[in-house]
């Protein structure tokens, strides 16, 4: 028995009817990045596995549980990119971007791979719109990336969103808080979920991020870092908030927001639909990562950015009934009744395409009726019919498929100009 393959679990084919959404998002991304002065970068789909183990953090779920790691035939350990930030920082260092005018504003759209439990909005391959500002320590850069992501969603017709914002201070200043957090949780350890008990040892800040109901009562009473920030981080946080207010971006402080990657300091944020209580459908998230470039072997270089899932944005666009341009059919559907005579068909189609018209050639050997039915179904504006009689007369018949004008005859040599003119007019 032959085997029928299917797309791997957690991946999806993006069929032609879904493409208008991708096109709309691609155009909106091009426009907002232009308005904010970001330049595009593309990094490889796979990278050295160590880049993420070190950069994202080897105790994070993304690296520890979800990363696709493999050895290539040369024995090198590689990973399919699970998140873009370490890859972009690697490129920043590799190409000496530290000597460019700072900060460097970069963006990409890139497939990401995570061995996650697939469900709606959560896939094993997703595509992220990722923006990074590298080389700025200023709070205005934090507000800028939030504003950029906010404007993208506005432009896409997605409403009912809010920004959740928190500050997790700087690494050094955080140490005292982590001790207090552990002291608080220690007496409750045996009542916490297995995941939280593990986090208590390996990554205590993430205790606050638990989605397990057994942990909720303890989370509520946990000490809140955002209320006890160091003076520098507190000032930074206040400036980010003031800048968001000035940009008219509603935001709420979420003291439990810590994010799932290790490199963050100070600002962390997510954009979530307000109807989404448990932030399962987070549209995008990010924050500041002032230690990451140095961790990857570069000089101390601050940075801030976000990633936003395009598939999730599409789900929200559909939920909000956002309008996208429907796919357009070809300009011309070429119907032909010339048994065995390929040349005139190819010549006519080529000359029309040369004139900039989109042409689909009907399947040979079908009846005229069947070909015209296909022409109608294709969404084409015009059918051009080429039969034995027309060919002998050096003409073709032009039929307006939207019934806006009478059927007419056109000389083959004039067809490109006449049809291009006619299509431009209507
Ligand atoms: P992240 O929160 O892991 O951050 O992912 C960013 C966004 O990607 C999420 O908010 C979500 O929209 C989307 N996403 C993540 N995982 C999946 C999935 N399995 N299926 C569908 N969509 C998903 C980062 O990756 C950081 N690199 C963001 C960043 C950039 N921080 C600073 N700069």
Image (spheres, rainbow, N blue to C red):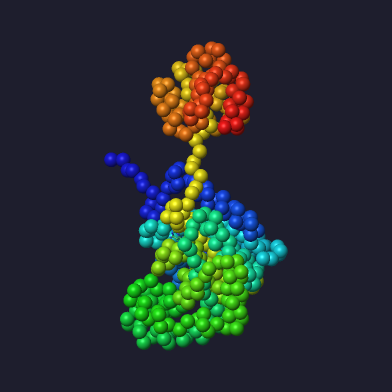
Q: Is residue 62 above or below residue 221?
A: above
Q: Looking at the image, can residue 312 be seen?
A: yes
Instruction: Identify the residue at image location x=45%, y=43%.
Output: 16
Q: Nearer the viewer, residue 224 or 238?
A: 238
User: Residue 338 placed where, x, y %?
Assistant: 47, 17
Q: Is residue 292 above or below residue 411?
A: below
Q: Nearer the viewer, residue 209 or 175?
A: 209
Identify the image quadrant of residue 125: bottom left
Instruction: Identify the residue at image location x=45%, y=55%.
Output: 320
Give the total number of marks visible in the rendering: 0
User: Residue 177 placed where, x, y %?
Assistant: 50, 84
Q: Nearer the viewer, residue 118 or 73?
A: 118
| Left or right position of 370 against 146 | left
Q: Nearer the viewer, residue 31 or 187?
A: 31
Q: Quick one: quadrant of the C terminus?
A: top right
Q: Quick one: quadrant of the N terminus?
A: top left
Instruction: Identify the residue at image location x=49%, y=35%.
Output: 329
Q: Looking at the image, can residue 78 be seen?
A: no
User: Residue 251 placed where, x, y %?
Assistant: 52, 70
User: Residue 12 placed where, x, y %?
Assistant: 41, 50
Identify the image quadrant of residue 415: top right
Instruction: Identify the residue at image location x=50%, y=74%.
Output: 253
Q: Residue furthest left?
A: 1
Q: Is residue 90 above or below residue 185?
A: above
Q: Is residue 271 above or below residue 186?
A: above
């Amino acid at each position: 028995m032959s085997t029928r393959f299917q797309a791997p679990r957690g991946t999806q084919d993006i069929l032609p009817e879904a493409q208008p959404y991708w096109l709309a998002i691609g155009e909106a991304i091009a426009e907002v990045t232009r308005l904010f002065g970001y330049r595009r970068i593309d990094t490889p789909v796979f990278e050295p596995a160590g880049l993420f183990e070190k950069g994202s953090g080897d105790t994070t779920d993304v690296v520890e549980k979800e990363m696709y790691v493999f050895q290539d035939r040369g024995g090198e350990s590689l990973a399919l990119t699970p998140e873009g930030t370490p890859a972009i920082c690697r490129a920043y260092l590799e190409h000496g971007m530290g000597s460019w005018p700072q900060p460097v504003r970069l963006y990409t759209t890139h497939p990401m791979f995570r061995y996650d439990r697939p469900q709606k909005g959560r896939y094993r391959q997703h595509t992220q719109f990722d923006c990074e500002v590298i080389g700025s320590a200023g709070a205005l850069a934090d507000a800028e990336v939030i504003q950029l992501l906010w404007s993208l969603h506005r432009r896409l017709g997605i409403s009912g969103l809010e920004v959740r914002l928190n500050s997790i201070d700087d690494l050094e200043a955080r140490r005292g808080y982590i001790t207090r957090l552990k002291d608080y949780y220690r007496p409750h350890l045996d009542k916490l979920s297995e995941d939280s008990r593990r986090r208590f040892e390996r990554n205590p800040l993430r205790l606050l991020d638990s989605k397990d109901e057994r942990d909720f009562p303890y989370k509520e009473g946990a000490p809140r870092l955002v209320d006890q920030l160091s003076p520098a981080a507190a000032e930074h946080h206040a400036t980010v908030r003031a800048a968001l207010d000035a940009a008219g971006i509603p935001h709420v402080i979420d003291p439990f927001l810590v994010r799932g990657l290790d490199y963050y300091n100070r600002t962390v944020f997510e954009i979530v639909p307000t109807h989404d209580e448990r932030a399962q459908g987070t549209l995008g998230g990010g924050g500041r990562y002032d230690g990451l470039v140095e961790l990857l072997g570069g000089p101390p270089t601050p940075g801030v950015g976000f990633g936003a899932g395009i598939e999730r944005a599409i789900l929200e666009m559909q939920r909000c009934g956002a309008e996208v341009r429907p796919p357009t059919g070809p300009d011309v559907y070429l119907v032909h009744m010339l048994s065995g005579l390929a040349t005139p068909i190819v010549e006519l189609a080529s000359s029309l395409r040369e004139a900039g018209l989109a042409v689909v050639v009907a399947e040979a050997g079908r009846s005229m009726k069947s070909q015209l039915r296909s022409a109608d179904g294709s969404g084409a504006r015009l059918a051009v019919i080429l039969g034995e009689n027309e060919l002998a007369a050096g003409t073709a018949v032009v039929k307006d498929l939207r019934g806006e004008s009478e059927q007419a005859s056109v000389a083959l040599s004039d067809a490109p100009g006449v049809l291009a003119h006619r299509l431009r007019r209507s």
